[in-house]
Amino acid sequence: MGAYLNPRGLAILTALDAVAKEKASSPAQVALAWLMARPGLVAPVASATSVAQVQDLVGATRLDLSPADVARLDAASA
């Protein structure tokens, strides 16, 4: 996990948290919606160990990220 908690990873987490707060959703929902918004990506892979986690992940399918949201997340990952 330490390999991902670098400046880039922390910037992505910060952007995910900010967009999640604005959208009244979870960071996991935003992350999956962000992946689903990427052209050419057929299906992001996520796992859950409880019904509550599955319900949270399903919420990503109803989350509408604006082009500005996607650009903000993309910029954080650059």
Image (spheres, rainbow, N blue to C red):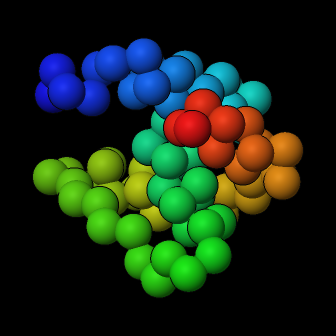
- Nearest the eye: 51 or 19: 19
Residue 33, image x, y percentages:
58, 58
Residue 45, image x, y percentages:
31, 67
Task: Tell me: 2 left or right of 60.
Answer: left
Locate the N terminus and report the quarter of the image it occupies.
Answer: top left
Q: Residue at x 42, y 77 (%)?
A: 43
- Nearest the eye: 38 or 51: 38
Q: Is residue 20 visible?
A: no
Q: Residue at x 29, y 61 (%)?
A: 46
The image quarter containing residue 22 is: top right
- Nearest the eye: 1 or 65: 1
How many numbered marks appear? 0
Q: Is residue 37 visible?
A: yes
Q: Residue at x 33, y 18 (%)?
A: 6
Residue at the far front in the pictured view: 78
Q: Residue at x 65, y 23 (%)?
A: 18
43 lies above or below 74 = below
Residue 73, image x, y percentages:
64, 40
